[in-house]
Amino acid sequence: MAAIDQVLENRSVCICAGSGGVGKTTTAAAVALGMAVEGLKVCVLTIDPAKRLADSLGMEELGNEATRVDPELLRANGIECRGELWAMMLDAKQTFDQLVARHAEDAEARERVLGNSIYQQISSALAGSQEYMAMEKLFELHTEGRFDLLVLDTPPSRNALDFLDAPERLTQFIEGRSLQLFIKPTGLAARVAGRGAGVVLALLKRILGFDLLADLSEFFTAFSGMIEGFQDRAHRVNALLRDDQTTFLIVCGPQAEPIEESVFFHSKLVEAGMNFGAAVVNRVRYRLVDGEVDPKQVEAEVDAELDEHDLSSRLALNLAEYELLADRDAENVEKLRERLGGAPLIRVPYLDTDVHDLTGLAEIDRYLFADEATRESLAT
Amino acid sequence: MLDFLDKRVLFVMGKGGVGKSTVATALGIRATLEGKRTIICEVSASENTSRLFRQEEVGYREVELANDLWAISIDPDDSMREYVLLQLKVKAMRDLLFRSRMFTYLAEATPGLNELVTIGKVWELAQLDRKVRHGRKYDLVIVDAPATGHGITFLRTPRTFARIAKVGPMYNQANELDRMVTDHETTGAVIVSLPEEMPVNETASLEHELVNDIGVSVDRILVNAVYPDRFGEDELPAIEAVAGSSEVLPRAAGRAGLSEIRRAVAQREQISRLEGMVSTPISLLPFVFDPELSLASARMLGEEIA
């Protein structure tokens, strides 16, 4: 079955999605590194990398702009890179501010929005704003055309679907502008709707307090001039997600919950007309023995090589449990494979140590960039 | 003794994938074993609903999962309605409000309102004298906090909201909720973590933010899925030798042993790193062989917490 470089052939955007805690950031970085090694100019956009990984990429200085990973650093880690590896850490709030600055009619409108307490809330805390800003940055870099391939590590959330819903949620929120018509007591709606609206307004004031309504009203008024620009942008961002140049990798672990979620996410991707590239299942325990394992027999055979019986029996018990976990992993992976309809599924084995540096990423690439048979033989 | 179970509200914090829901359930079972009627709240409907909740079809209704162990999935819309219900006593006024498009818009457009009414429901559940019809009295309310933003945004909502609202009943309500969140006598938090690089770092910064920025009492850090000390480090050479065997079974046993010992050593390193980074007491929870959340496995875990 296909290796990751085949999956990404002729693609210029690769989005790594999946629930939290499944090694998404590491996978995104490994994919980017591997493609750079093959000769492409690649940029990985990451949200919140582990400090050790960031350090090992020489990223401690990184802000909201792409920075090249020093080729010397790669060479020092034994990585011969024919292309270029770039990386950036996404700052959602800063990206949102830049977006406001871009769409504001003038400096005054910009300052009014940036200074509004409602804006400060939504730009950092509104559900979906971090996801949307990740897409926004991706779109910006893609439009600039400086890179052959962009790899996006999506924000950590429990539900990968949050990512796909983000543009819609944000535009819906912004379109809530019709609100301001209601909020102003002298507004159009009050006149049209007559007394009913007046009563509702009075009730709302009673429940929410007046200042909140005033702040909201001010926010939507200040924002109203930018709405078209925002909407237009959101449409184009959305179009990029569906473009033929874009492909999604679903990253998950072999436990039942992430697998179930990946099945669900895959069906949603297909439904939404997006290109699905491959599923990457991390931390898979491969079976070490074919067929049933009899702990007694293992114990006896290990005994023959060791003169410490107690250790032999612990090793036998440990192997039996390892194989059971491997069976569980295999069962779950099979469930996902069945639902992918022949699309590639890449298993990365449960390595003895976690990956925090360039050598670790290169180790993962041995699996990501191999065919299934090679992967199997490397892992067992 | 888990003295934090004597509080009335306990927030279970942590990022996705660390087993937060399992631990919340395990703590709930443990509390019932100590004679407390307990309710577990799931608060983020948009997030992946825990398996247990799906199996038992828990909704915005208090459901008994096991003896004295209750569950509710707090939906912000329902909480908002309930809040309005308690605020406006006249039915005609309520109906007018619920039917109004303006109300729907406003509820959606006001940042943090969903989180605020959700915490409001937690507060309501923790009252000894509940105003809601058929409201039971609970000794302990356990909240499986949202994983997104590490749940920090969630717990900060009352204060943020009070700052935005400035005056009015919502302002008063938000202040009341902030008092609840930061009352060390009645409210506590535990952080669920894993013995791995990222979760350890995140736990340390989460502890810092909860304690110093919000003022929450962080009572315990629970490190989940810790491997047993099955092999000693002095046994490594022997295990390596077995892994190099030419026989199939010994070789496999050796390789599985190496994986176990290397992982266990790495975990111990992470745990001692965590110990150096935080001031909250740490408890270790064993790796559960079958981590598919069932009441039985949660019970086992609950009994293990020391």
Image (tube, coloured by chain):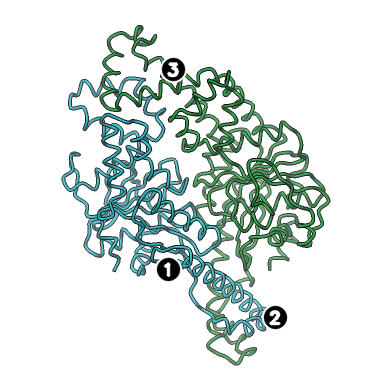
Q: Label 1 sits on what residue type? A: Leu
The answer to whether residue A3 is seen in the rendering is: no
Mark 3, residue position: A178
- From the viewer's perspective, tell me whether residue B131 is left or right of residue B63: left
Mark 1, residue position: B284
Front residue of B123/A310: it is B123
Discs 2 and 3 carry the same chain letter: no
Using the image, name the chain to which the residue with label 1 belongs.
B
Q: Label 2 sits on what residue type? A: Gly
Using the image, name the chain to which the residue with label 2 belongs.
B
Mark 3 and mark 2 in contact (Cβ < 8 Å)?
no
Disc 3 element: helix
In the rendered view, would you say A104 is above or below A127?
above
Q: CA distance from mark 2 to mark 3?
A: 72 Å
Chain A drawing hue: green
Q: Residues within 10 Å of mark 3 (few under 14, many from 20)?
A: some
In the rendered view, would you say B216 is above or below B224?
above
Q: Quadrant of the C terminus of chain A?
A: bottom right
Q: CA distance from mark 2 to mark 1?
A: 33 Å
Disc 1 element: strand
Using the image, name the chain to which the residue with label 3 belongs.
A
Disc 2 element: loop
Front residue of B103/A18: it is B103
Disc number lying in front (2 or 3): 3
In the image, farthest residue toward the bottom:
A307
Disc number lying in front (2 or 1): 1
Q: CA distance from mark 3 to mark 1?
A: 52 Å
Mark 2, residue position: B244
